[in-house]
Amino acid sequence: MTVMASKFSLAVYPWVYLAQYDDSGSWNGDYHEQEHRTPKEEAAMSAAEHEQLLVRRNWIDGLPLVNYTTQYGYGCFEGLKAFPQPDGGLRIFRPEENAKRMHRSMKGLRMPAIPEDMFVDGVVGSVARNAALGFAPPYDPAWETDNFLTADSVYIRPFSYSEAGIGLNIPKHPYVVVVTTPVGSYFDPDSASKAVTTDKVRATPGGTGWIKCDANYVLPTMVKYEVMAQGYMEAIFLDAREQTYIEEGSSSNIFFLLANGTLVTPSLSDTILPGITRTSVMQLAADRGVPVEERRISIDEVMSDAVEAFVTGTAAGLSYLESITHKGTEKVLRNREIGELTRDMLVELKGIQYGAVEDRHGWMTDVPKL
């Protein structure tokens, strides 16, 4: 099962949330209804007509073209999902955690940070308004046959965007925009799920590796596509100083089940993004009585002792690794099949998100019907 980045879509739904920090020191936000037809009418449009409509919809309220975000990558973003439920509703996975991280990211970039409750309201309200127009996938009972591995959802992308500017500067009146799009399955059972270490460096100590900022994703994306061309799914980044300790996959946290039954993930530092799926998976493992450790783990220890490995993130939830290659040596895990612990936690996580498993930790937020 492989993460497929092509599943992202620029078919942005009509309702967009826009907030901005003003001279009075306050954040003010509102919803904007972009040009649209009904979902059925849009589906009947020619490809060219629909593309033109989406281009027009993807521009809001005269946001400045030349600014610190477009010129210097000075911005941050979040990614989260709303999941169709058996009762016809939608629920969002842990939006309050994304709000906390967005607040930390904006403060870390020395710009005014959007209040957490305002962020959550903008996220929930955007999904609710679009769903009221019919822009949300309906629940499909057929998804239950493969434990929701091929189910659809609503992808939510909040991001900061600076005011106009061309010189090097810090945004003083940033915007936060929330857009939503359809997203399909990220699992391709016919693709290899091999990983390989890289000598490229994702983040350096004292830098912005802990912030979900735009610039952090340039090099990992380049490296991911380099290794994909070599037949791998994922690149594994090692620490900047010693090139010895594992830090992350390309835009994902990473876990290893060791032969002694302990689940290990690299401990958080200023070079590792604190993933929300990461903390959720740690809780699911602990619920099973699995010992969980956050600590430095070397590539040599993984090549010697790991029996399962997987990466985590919003897009895939959990995506297992069938093998890890380091300096030309490949370590095969579970005969290239998904491991039992990885599968069990993946099934439970998906079940919680799609309403098939009890949400005993209170992770899901209801989207009101308007």
Image (tube, rainbow, N blue to C red):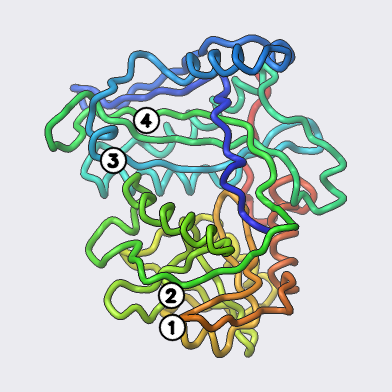
Residue type pointed to by label 4? Val
Pick whichever, 176 or 254, lies toward us. Answer: 254
For disc 1, the marked residue is 298
In the image, is 258 to the left or to the right of 273? right
The earlier-in-sequence mark between 3 and 4 is 3
Residue type pointed to by label 2? Ile
The earlier-in-sequence mark between 2 and 1 is 2
Query: Label for residue 73?
Result: 3
Q: Are the residues flagged by discs 4 and 2 in contact, CB closer than 8 Å?
A: no
For disc 4, the marked residue is 176
The quarter of the picture where the N terminus appears is: bottom right
User: What x and y, as percent, mark residue 314?
Assistant: 56, 50
The earlier-in-sequence mark between 4 and 2 is 4
Residue type pointed to by label 3? Gly
Pick whichever, 211 or 28, lies toward us. Answer: 211
Residue pictured at 46% horizontal, 72% vertical: 197
* Residue 242 vertical placement versus 287 (above, below): below
In the image, is 36 to the left or to the right of 191? left
Residue pictured at 73% horizontal, 79% vertical: 335
Q: Are the residues flagged by discs 1 and 3 in contact, CB closer than 8 Å?
A: no
